[in-house]
Image (spheres, grey):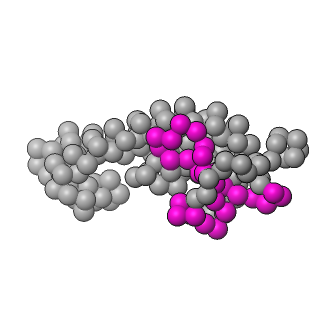
Amino acid sequence: MGEPTRIFTLEEANELVPTLELEFGRVARLRDELKGLVEALGGADASVDILQNGAAPPPGQEVEAARLRAVADEIGAAVQRVSELGCLVKDLDLGLVDFYAMMENRPVLLCWQFGERQIAHWHDVDEGFSGRKPIEGVEVAPPEFLN
């Protein structure tokens, strides 16, 4: 796991949930389109060759290949926008985002999943999604602690 780009309070993380909902909603729609394009182009291996190796698409599928590249770029841009907020995108399939925070004088990760209305879970920095614990009743460091 990389160095924290930002330490969040629970309130700061929750303020980003509407933005995350928009971005991950967009990513979900793009991923659905991407799946159709991958199938149209002959599967994952052919699509990877087109995206990563610059391979020519099958004859007559230049439009699909161009759209594949555009959709992949749009997904990458959405992930970049979320990352620039100081969040950690952990899993696009599940729509998982972590936020560094301080709890009881130690760093932890607040954990949000696409579809959740607010941050409701956290886990230690050496744990993943399976280590999520309810945030209810746990004190996340107030802003003055972080200064």
Q: Is residue 122 magenta?
A: yes
Compare residues 73 and 13 and report the one nearer the observer.
Answer: 13
Is 134 drawn above or below residue 126 in the view shown?
above
Left or right of residue 92, residue 49 in this image: left
Residue 15 is situated, as x and y percent measured from the top left of the image, at: 64, 33
Compare residues 108 and 77 and report the one nearer the observer.
Answer: 108
Location of the C terminus (image quadrant)? top right
Q: Residue furthest front?
A: 137
Is 66 drawn above or below residue 103 in the view shown?
above
Location of the N terminus (image quadrant)? bottom right
Seen at 34% across and 38% down, the residue is 29
Left or right of residue 58, residue 83 in this image: right
Residues drawn in magenta: 104-131
Residue 67 is situated, as x and y percent measured from the top left of the image, at: 27, 39
Seen at 87% across and 46% down, the residue is 145
Left or right of residue 3, residue 34 in this image: left
Seen at 67% across and 63% down, the residue is 124
Q: Is residue 83 visible?
A: no
Compare residues 80 and 28 and report the one nearer the observer.
Answer: 28
Q: Is residue 115 magenta?
A: yes
Residue 50 is situated, as x and y percent measured from the top left of the image, at: 27, 54
Residue 80 is situated, as x and y percent measured from the top left of the image, at: 53, 44
Seen at 61% across and 57% down, the residue is 133
